[in-house]
Amino acid sequence: MAETKAAKTNDAKKAKVTAAPAFSKETYMRWYEMMQLMRKFEEKAGQLYGQQKIKGFCHLYIGQEACAAGAITALTKDDKWITAYRDHAHPLGLGTSPNAVMAELYAKATGCSKGKGGSMHIFDKEVNFVGGHGIVGAQVPLGAGLAFAEKYNKTGNVSITYMGDGAVRQGALHEAFNMAMLWKLPAIFVVENNGYAMGTSVQRTSNVTELYKLGLSYDMPSEAVNAMRCEDVHDAVARAAERARAGEGPTFLEFRTYRYKGHSMSDPAKYRTKEELESYRNQDPIESVRFTILENKFATEQELEEIDNKIKAQVQESVEFAEKSPYPAPEELYTDIYVEKDYPYVMD
């Protein structure tokens, strides 16, 4: 391609930063623990998939952790979240039990979707995570609908809708953008642009490679964000949320990020160079936060190691929980489909 993904985002900063911290010690420590949980959980999920204990499709979030972590600290616990099928990390960051997410990957009855959704359909109403969605772009109008409900009910809450860069080619996105602007819905739309969608670079699929500009055709405030940094993500989402809560309508954010693994576990990612991958590893969001913590003496190496060990134990516990949990009973095939309790299924 004409330019590499690394060259396109040459304004992205290295993992090590020297500026004074822009946020409190508590925020940096929360980011570190949150992203380490996401990373260790996904690494374990990838290992288990290789052992065929997790089946079906599995899309890992490794490298993109700041996209979720930075936004979580910018929003409230009452705001609504929805995303595509790369969906393990968001609920973990919001507070969903790793046990429930891992059990769902195992298709066990104790999973957060009762073992019926698997990797691509994680839901948790308790933390206002309205699911991962397997149809590309399908969650975009749903996210607009969530925002409509919040506006209709005058809650003051916003919805945040995540999508991959491949989803911006879907017509549903443009229909949702048009209605969201027309009705000034309290919505934040986020494209996690890792550059390759399922494996084809943005440069090979569109004349518009700066994806945030798609929002400008609807007069929607739109901007690109260095999403390898929690600080930049938090600031952008906080601005968008302030606009939304003030009744000024939606925002479209292009999170420029990178996944270290392939699109899914079946993708060897041969379409990119080792040099490009390494350039993004040098901007690792966890290492950036770790450096800031140590540089500003928010915590010691030993204290961070204790956090790491706690998270490793937590992830291992989730595996043991999933292993011991039962599969759904056969009659569960007929539940959670219709609200009507006595729906007349044809059983024979």
Image: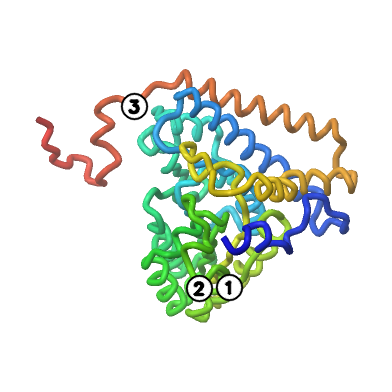
The tally of labels here is: 3
Give the residue type that dot 3 points to: Pro
Q: Residues within 10 Å of mark 1 (few under 14, many from 20)?
A: many
Give the residue type that dot 1 points to: Ser
Q: Is residue 71 above or below residue 30?
A: below
Q: Residues within 10 Å of mark 3 (few under 14, many from 20)?
A: some
Q: Is residue 94 above or below residue 309?
A: below
Q: In whole angstroms, how far apart are the C-alphas of marks 3 and 2? A: 43 Å
Mark 1 or mark 2, whichever is nearer to me: 2
Could you tell me residue 19's position as x and y percent?
87, 58
Of 216 and 33, nearer the camera is 216
Q: Residue placed at 71% from the left, 40% from the top?
A: 33
Q: Which mark is residue 328?
A: 3
Q: What is the secondary structure assignment of the residue under circle 3?
A: loop
Mark 1 touching mark 2, by CB under 8 A?
Answer: yes
Q: Residue placed at 81% from the left, 59% from the top?
A: 22
Could you tell me residue 233's position as x and y percent?
67, 59
Could you tell me residue 305's position as x and y percent?
79, 31
Q: Which mark is residue 222?
A: 1
Q: In whole angstroms, how far apart are the C-alphas of marks 1 and 3? A: 44 Å
Give the residue type that dot 2 points to: Leu
Would residue 217 be found to the left or right of residue 333 on screen?
right
Q: In whole angstroms, how far apart are the C-alphas of marks 1 and 2? A: 8 Å
